[in-house]
Image (spheres, rainbow, N blue to C red):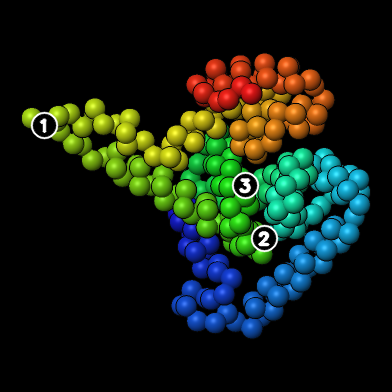
Amino acid sequence: MEEAQGIEEAEEDDLDTDESGGALPAERKRAIEEHLAEVASETAFLRNFTPAELRSALLEVVARSRKVLPESLVRLSVAAHAADDRPLLSLTFEALIKTATPLLTSQAWDIDGQNIDDQIQDILVKLFEDIRAGKAEMAGRVFTAWAKRRSISLYRQRAARFEGSSDRVEPTADGDPLDEIAERISSFDARELLDRGIEKLPEKHAAAFIRVYILGMTQEEVAKEMNVNVRTLRDWLKKSAKALGHNGDDE
């Protein structure tokens, strides 16, 4: 099975040890060292840009007219978060999304169509959470390995849900198991439902909602970035919240 083979290969792709738990072969260790040196060099090069030059370079990445390593973009995102520069964080992460999406698509095992888009969005949300929590070290070293591990985790969650759905639990005198279904919905499923809802919003409404409620930007920052007044932005957020059943703070 092609998917299973890909997963086995992914599980062997570790940064510090081989599949037997021993030290990495010298050739692979050398390749990783060269990769990390390239990432460090590129990141330092970009950090020497003026704010205007960096913004221009990131916009080129978003437009796919310039290539930057995903690890460099992760490190720049971490730095922007540490500096509390939310507009820069938003733009850097947008560039990271454009760069990482083809790789994440190739790692979406046993699914297709809309389900691939849902998985990519889930992984990117997890990555942003890791960046804000100071847990993005692996993604900033070898992004492919980090992404594979996340894809494996989601693959196993799907497999576990499928296996669980085959187990029939009959009602008893104490109650019907169906009554507890809502309580057993996992956070992964809840996020999946929210992701699909966001995708159905008008493009500008979705972009505003993500920036405020996921990226943590202020309404003033988002309004300035999207070139609209705050009143218009709040109207978009209210409509988005109503469509998603989200009780967010309108202020």
Is residue 75 placed above or below 93 in the rendered structure?
below
Q: CA distance from mark 2 to mark 1?
A: 51 Å
Q: In the image, residue 57 lies at what x, y percent?
A: 87, 48
Mark 1 lies on a secondary structure that is loop
| Residue at numbered disc 2 | 140
Q: In the image, residue 81 lies at what x, y percent?
A: 70, 50
Tell which residue pokes out farthest to the front in this image: 251
Q: Amino acid at mark 1?
A: Asp
| Residue at numbered disc 3 | 128
Q: Can residue 203 be seen by looking at this rendering?
A: no
Q: Earlier in the sequence, mark 2 or mark 3?
A: 3
Task: Identify which residue, 176 or 219, lies in the foreground.
Answer: 219
Q: Residue at x 80, y 61 (%)?
A: 43
Q: Amino acid at mark 2?
A: Gly
| Residue at numbered disc 1 | 174
Q: Is residue 169 left or right of residue 2?
A: left
Q: Amino acid at mark 3?
A: Phe
**Is disc 3 surrounded by few (<14), some (14 to 19) or many (20+) residues within 10 Å?**
many
Is residue 56 placed above or below 193 in the rendered structure?
below
Q: Earlier in the sequence, mark 2 or mark 1?
A: 2
The answer to whether mark 2 and mark 3 are in CB contact below 8 A is no
